[in-house]
Amino acid sequence: MFESKLRVNTSSKRVASTTKRYLEKKFGLTYNYAISSRNHLMLDFDCKGEKTTCFTEVRMICILYSKEFPGHYSVYETPNGFHVISSTEYTWRDVRKILESLLLGIKDGIWHYLDDKYIEACLRRGYCTLRLNQLRKVAEYSVGDILWETQEYQI
Amino acid sequence: MARRRKRSPTVTTELEDLDEMMETAEIMKKEKELIESIHEAVEEELKSWGIVEEEFKVDIEEHGDIWWTVIPSKEKKGE
Protein backbone atom coordinates (compact mmCIF):
# COMPACT_ATOMS: atom_id res chain seq x y z
CA MET A 1 0.00 0.00 0.00
CA PHE A 2 1.24 3.47 -0.87
CA GLU A 3 2.30 5.54 2.10
CA SER A 4 2.69 9.23 1.48
CA LYS A 5 5.92 10.87 2.65
CA LEU A 6 4.71 14.27 1.58
CA ARG A 7 5.35 17.30 3.81
CA VAL A 8 4.07 20.77 3.03
CA ASN A 9 5.49 23.69 5.00
CA THR A 10 3.81 27.05 5.07
CA SER A 11 3.81 30.07 7.34
CA SER A 12 0.11 30.56 6.67
CA LYS A 13 -2.48 28.76 8.76
CA ARG A 14 -4.98 29.26 5.96
CA VAL A 15 -2.75 27.69 3.30
CA ALA A 16 -2.05 24.74 5.62
CA SER A 17 -5.74 24.27 6.16
CA THR A 18 -6.67 24.34 2.50
CA THR A 19 -3.68 22.18 1.53
CA LYS A 20 -4.76 19.51 4.00
CA ARG A 21 -8.25 19.39 2.57
CA TYR A 22 -6.93 19.42 -0.97
CA LEU A 23 -4.58 16.47 -0.40
CA GLU A 24 -7.20 14.45 1.46
CA LYS A 25 -9.69 14.92 -1.32
CA LYS A 26 -7.16 14.23 -4.05
CA PHE A 27 -5.53 11.10 -2.59
CA GLY A 28 -8.16 9.74 -0.22
CA LEU A 29 -5.54 9.71 2.57
CA THR A 30 -5.69 11.52 5.89
CA TYR A 31 -3.25 14.25 6.80
CA ASN A 32 -2.48 16.04 10.08
CA TYR A 33 -1.02 19.39 10.96
CA ALA A 34 2.19 20.01 12.81
CA ILE A 35 3.07 23.34 14.35
CA SER A 36 6.65 24.52 14.67
CA SER A 37 8.25 27.58 16.22
CA ARG A 38 11.38 28.88 17.87
CA ASN A 39 9.39 31.48 19.81
CA HIS A 40 6.63 29.48 21.46
CA LEU A 41 7.25 26.90 24.14
CA MET A 42 5.75 23.52 23.21
CA LEU A 43 5.83 20.46 25.45
CA ASP A 44 4.75 16.88 25.01
CA PHE A 45 3.59 14.62 27.87
CA ASP A 46 3.21 10.87 27.55
CA CYS A 47 0.80 9.78 30.30
CA LYS A 48 1.50 6.02 30.15
CA GLY A 49 -2.16 5.39 30.93
CA GLU A 50 -2.17 7.60 34.06
CA LYS A 51 -4.02 10.68 32.85
CA THR A 52 -4.95 12.23 36.21
CA THR A 53 -1.48 11.96 37.79
CA CYS A 54 0.03 13.10 34.53
CA PHE A 55 -2.24 16.16 34.48
CA THR A 56 -1.03 17.10 37.98
CA GLU A 57 2.49 17.25 36.55
CA VAL A 58 1.26 19.31 33.57
CA ARG A 59 -0.45 21.76 35.95
CA MET A 60 2.65 22.09 38.16
CA ILE A 61 4.91 22.78 35.21
CA CYS A 62 2.48 25.31 33.70
CA ILE A 63 2.06 27.19 36.97
CA LEU A 64 5.78 27.20 37.81
CA TYR A 65 7.10 28.13 34.39
CA SER A 66 4.37 30.60 33.38
CA LYS A 67 5.31 32.46 36.55
CA GLU A 68 9.07 32.28 36.17
CA PHE A 69 8.95 33.15 32.45
CA PRO A 70 5.76 35.27 32.46
CA GLY A 71 3.38 33.81 29.91
CA HIS A 72 0.09 32.27 28.93
CA TYR A 73 -0.03 28.49 28.41
CA SER A 74 -2.78 26.33 26.91
CA VAL A 75 -3.07 22.61 27.59
CA TYR A 76 -4.48 20.21 25.00
CA GLU A 77 -5.39 16.62 25.70
CA THR A 78 -4.12 14.15 23.08
CA PRO A 79 -4.90 10.42 22.73
CA ASN A 80 -1.72 9.54 24.71
CA GLY A 81 -1.20 12.54 26.96
CA PHE A 82 -1.06 16.30 26.77
CA HIS A 83 0.48 19.09 24.73
CA VAL A 84 1.35 22.44 26.29
CA ILE A 85 1.69 25.41 23.94
CA SER A 86 2.55 28.94 25.03
CA SER A 87 0.69 31.68 23.25
CA THR A 88 3.26 34.07 24.67
CA GLU A 89 6.21 34.71 22.43
CA TYR A 90 9.64 34.11 23.89
CA THR A 91 13.10 34.36 22.43
CA TRP A 92 14.63 31.01 21.46
CA ARG A 93 17.16 31.71 24.23
CA ASP A 94 14.34 31.63 26.82
CA VAL A 95 12.64 28.62 25.22
CA ARG A 96 15.98 26.80 25.29
CA LYS A 97 16.52 27.79 28.91
CA ILE A 98 13.08 26.39 29.87
CA LEU A 99 13.66 23.18 27.92
CA GLU A 100 17.10 22.64 29.47
CA SER A 101 15.70 23.24 32.94
CA LEU A 102 12.85 20.77 32.32
CA LEU A 103 15.28 18.19 30.97
CA LEU A 104 17.32 18.48 34.16
CA GLY A 105 14.08 17.96 36.12
CA ILE A 106 13.42 14.74 34.19
CA LYS A 107 16.97 13.50 34.83
CA ASP A 108 16.62 14.34 38.54
CA GLY A 109 13.39 12.33 38.69
CA ILE A 110 11.12 15.35 39.36
CA TRP A 111 9.09 14.97 36.15
CA HIS A 112 7.87 11.55 35.12
CA TYR A 113 5.57 12.14 32.18
CA LEU A 114 7.32 14.91 30.29
CA ASP A 115 8.85 13.39 27.16
CA ASP A 116 12.65 13.73 27.39
CA LYS A 117 13.24 12.49 23.84
CA TYR A 118 10.95 15.23 22.57
CA ILE A 119 12.86 17.92 24.52
CA GLU A 120 16.22 16.58 23.33
CA ALA A 121 14.95 16.69 19.75
CA CYS A 122 13.78 20.32 20.17
CA LEU A 123 17.17 21.34 21.56
CA ARG A 124 18.97 19.51 18.74
CA ARG A 125 16.79 21.04 16.01
CA GLY A 126 16.70 24.55 17.48
CA TYR A 127 12.91 24.77 17.40
CA CYS A 128 9.84 23.10 18.91
CA THR A 129 7.45 21.07 16.81
CA LEU A 130 4.27 19.18 17.68
CA ARG A 131 1.96 16.98 15.64
CA LEU A 132 -1.60 18.20 16.16
CA ASN A 133 -4.04 15.35 16.13
CA GLN A 134 -7.29 14.74 18.02
CA LEU A 135 -6.70 17.67 20.35
CA ARG A 136 -9.06 18.88 23.05
CA LYS A 137 -8.29 22.03 25.01
CA VAL A 138 -8.51 21.25 28.72
CA ALA A 139 -6.82 24.09 30.62
CA GLU A 140 -5.22 27.53 30.51
CA TYR A 141 -2.66 29.07 32.84
CA SER A 142 -1.33 32.58 33.00
CA VAL A 143 1.58 33.99 35.00
CA GLY A 144 1.39 31.36 37.72
CA ASP A 145 -2.42 31.27 37.95
CA ILE A 146 -5.05 28.78 36.84
CA LEU A 147 -7.31 30.58 34.34
CA TRP A 148 -9.59 27.60 33.82
CA GLU A 149 -9.52 23.81 33.80
CA THR A 150 -12.04 21.40 32.39
CA GLN A 151 -14.21 19.92 35.14
CA GLU A 152 -12.71 16.42 35.01
CA TYR A 153 -9.24 17.73 35.81
CA GLN A 154 -10.17 20.23 38.51
CA ILE A 155 -8.70 19.66 41.97
CA MET B 1 13.93 -26.24 -31.69
CA ALA B 2 14.57 -23.47 -29.19
CA ARG B 3 13.37 -24.24 -25.69
CA ARG B 4 11.42 -21.52 -23.88
CA ARG B 5 12.97 -20.58 -20.59
CA LYS B 6 10.64 -20.71 -17.66
CA ARG B 7 10.54 -17.56 -15.58
CA SER B 8 11.76 -18.32 -12.09
CA PRO B 9 9.62 -17.36 -9.07
CA THR B 10 12.36 -14.93 -7.98
CA VAL B 11 12.19 -13.03 -11.25
CA THR B 12 8.38 -12.87 -11.01
CA THR B 13 8.59 -11.45 -7.50
CA GLU B 14 11.15 -8.87 -8.58
CA LEU B 15 8.92 -7.81 -11.45
CA GLU B 16 5.97 -7.46 -9.09
CA ASP B 17 8.15 -5.34 -6.79
CA LEU B 18 9.14 -3.23 -9.76
CA ASP B 19 5.50 -2.71 -10.71
CA GLU B 20 4.76 -1.58 -7.17
CA MET B 21 7.78 0.71 -7.13
CA MET B 22 6.75 2.27 -10.41
CA GLU B 23 3.24 2.77 -9.12
CA THR B 24 4.60 4.46 -5.97
CA ALA B 25 6.99 6.60 -8.01
CA GLU B 26 4.11 7.64 -10.23
CA ILE B 27 2.02 8.69 -7.24
CA MET B 28 4.98 10.56 -5.73
CA LYS B 29 5.49 12.35 -9.05
CA LYS B 30 1.82 13.28 -9.06
CA GLU B 31 2.12 14.53 -5.49
CA LYS B 32 5.09 16.73 -6.45
CA GLU B 33 3.20 18.16 -9.39
CA LEU B 34 0.25 18.69 -7.14
CA ILE B 35 2.26 20.69 -4.64
CA GLU B 36 3.50 22.92 -7.42
CA SER B 37 -0.07 23.46 -8.49
CA ILE B 38 -1.09 24.12 -4.87
CA HIS B 39 1.38 26.95 -4.63
CA GLU B 40 0.02 28.38 -7.83
CA ALA B 41 -3.69 27.88 -7.61
CA VAL B 42 -4.88 26.23 -4.44
CA GLU B 43 -7.53 28.75 -3.56
CA GLU B 44 -9.22 28.69 -6.95
CA GLU B 45 -9.33 24.86 -6.92
CA LEU B 46 -10.81 24.71 -3.47
CA LYS B 47 -13.35 27.39 -4.15
CA SER B 48 -14.55 25.39 -7.14
CA TRP B 49 -15.08 22.37 -4.85
CA GLY B 50 -16.92 24.50 -2.35
CA ILE B 51 -14.46 23.62 0.43
CA VAL B 52 -14.58 25.96 3.36
CA GLU B 53 -11.64 26.82 5.49
CA GLU B 54 -11.11 24.43 8.39
CA GLU B 55 -10.80 25.81 11.89
CA PHE B 56 -7.59 25.07 13.71
CA LYS B 57 -7.94 23.71 17.18
CA VAL B 58 -4.87 25.53 18.43
CA ASP B 59 -5.70 29.09 19.33
CA ILE B 60 -2.38 30.56 18.47
CA GLU B 61 -2.22 33.64 16.32
CA GLU B 62 -0.60 33.51 12.93
CA HIS B 63 2.91 34.85 13.12
CA GLY B 64 6.01 34.88 10.96
CA ASP B 65 7.93 32.76 13.45
CA ILE B 66 5.42 29.94 13.42
CA TRP B 67 5.15 27.51 10.57
CA TRP B 68 2.60 24.83 9.85
CA THR B 69 3.27 21.52 8.19
CA VAL B 70 0.74 19.23 6.57
CA ILE B 71 1.93 15.68 7.17
CA PRO B 72 0.51 12.25 6.36
CA SER B 73 -1.51 10.81 9.20
CA LYS B 74 -0.13 7.83 11.09
CA GLU B 75 -3.64 6.43 11.35
CA LYS B 76 -5.31 4.53 8.54
CA LYS B 77 -8.32 6.22 7.00
CA GLY B 78 -11.48 5.57 8.97
CA GLU B 79 -9.69 4.95 12.29
Image: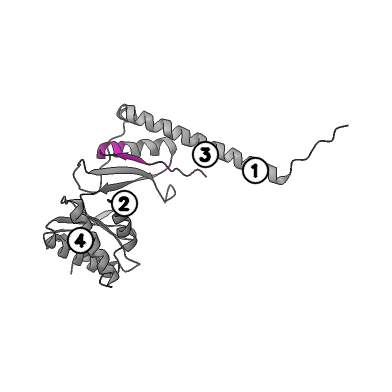
Query: Which residue is label 3 attached to?
Result: B24
Nearest-to-viewer mark from 3 and 4: 3
Query: Which residue is label 4 attached to?
Result: A150
Name the residue located 44 percent from the left edge and 37 percent from the top edge: A27
Q: Amino acid at mark 1?
A: Glu
Of mark 1 and mark 3, the one earlier in the sequence is 1
- Check the residue under mark 3 and report the chain it is in: B
The image shows residue B25, relative to residue A145, as above or below, that is above
Q: Disc 3 on helix, strand or loop?
A: helix
User: Residue A105 placed where, x, y %?
Assistant: 25, 68
Say if labels 1 and 4 share a chain: no
Q: Amino acid at mark 4?
A: Thr
C-alpha distance separating marks 1 and 4:
56 Å
**Magenta span:** A1-18
Say if labels 1 and 3 share a chain: yes
Name the residue located 31 percent from the left edge and 34 percent from the top edge: B51
Quadrant of the image containing the C terminus of chain A: bottom left
As drawn, which residue projects farthest toward the right? B1
User: Residue A72 placed where, x, y %?
Assistant: 14, 55
CB contact under 8 Å: marks 1 and 4: no
Q: Quadrant of residue B17?
A: top right
Name the residue located 19 percent from the left edge and 54 percent from the top edge: A93
Query: Which residue is label 2 attached to?
Result: A125
Q: Which mark is residue A82?
A: none
